[in-house]
Amino acid sequence: MITNKELLQKSEQLNNLDLTKWFNQELFSLPWFVTFFIVLVCYVLFFYLVDKKRIVEILLYGSFVAVLFVVYDSFGNFFGYWTDLITVVPFSPNFFGDSFTVVPLISMLIYQYTSSWKSFIISYIVFSTVLEFGYYNYLLEKLDVYTFLKPEPFLILIDYIAIILIGVIPRLVTIYLFKIEERNRNH
């Protein structure tokens, strides 16, 4: 029987290995700098471009995207479908990579700049295509920052569809919540 103490010891050993690898191999490497630069550019662009009059609404949408993406990404990591090989900070999930930066920040800008469902869907499909096939499957894989551990075409298609849904479902929820708020404001 495996005890909680044994699991905690193994977890501590794995955390120590991760931290040692991060300090000795990842931190300040070229892929780390590229990832850090992408994160920095995303935050700068977001704070420069975000509509300050709608910031609460936009951040609510982005929060839903971030939560869904963290859950989805954690699921994929746990079951060995993909992994981050280099991270900006040595934590899991990769907070300052995709989970709380690239995907939510760009998603929020798409949400802000599209008013109709048609323009949102088209924009989000374009973003998801670039993210899946250009960013993940090309740039990050070439830099050994990220990899699909089971790179089957079917898995990549599922990932692509999931990324689209991670943007669409929060928009549905956000619009619905603001309609409820508007309805109750008038009573």
Image: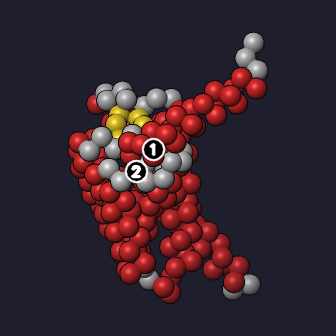
Task: Residue 7 in the image: state x and y as whole percent.
Answer: 69, 26
Does any portion of residue 128 appear in the rendered image?
Answer: no
Which residue shows up at 44% across the image and 61% down it?
A: 101
Above-or-below relation of 103 to 48: above
Q: Amino acid at mark 2?
A: Leu
Task: Residue 139 in the image: state x and y as whole percent.
Answer: 24, 48
Task: Residue 29 in the image: state x and y as whole percent.
Answer: 32, 50
Farthest-out residue, top: 1
Dot 2 crowding, Cα within 10 Å, few <14, some 14–19, many 20+: some
Q: Say which quadrant the N terminus sits in.
A: top right
Q: Say which quadrant the C terminus sits in.
A: bottom right
The tag on residue 141 is none
Taking 175 as reference, is 142 left or right? left
Does any portion of residue 180 appear in the rendered image?
Answer: yes
Q: Secondary structure at mark 2?
A: loop
Task: Residue 156 in the image: state x and y as whole percent.
Answer: 33, 36
Dot 1 crowding, Cα within 10 Å, few <14, some 14–19, many 20+: many
Residues tagged 1 and 2 counted as in contact (Cβ below 8 A):
yes
Look at mark 2 in the image and give the residue it sits on.
Answer: 27
Look at mark 1 in the image and give the residue it sits on.
Answer: 22
Q: Amino acid at mark 1?
A: Trp
Taking 55 as reference, is 103 left or right? left
Which residue shows up at 52% across the image and 66% down it?
A: 61
Taking 47 as reference, is 19 left or right? right
Viewer-side residue, 131 vs 98: 98
- Of the two numbered discs 1 and 2 on the same chain, state the one appearing first in sequence: 1
Q: Secondary structure at mark 1?
A: helix
* Residue 152 in which image quadrant: top left
Above-or-below relation of 101 to 143: below
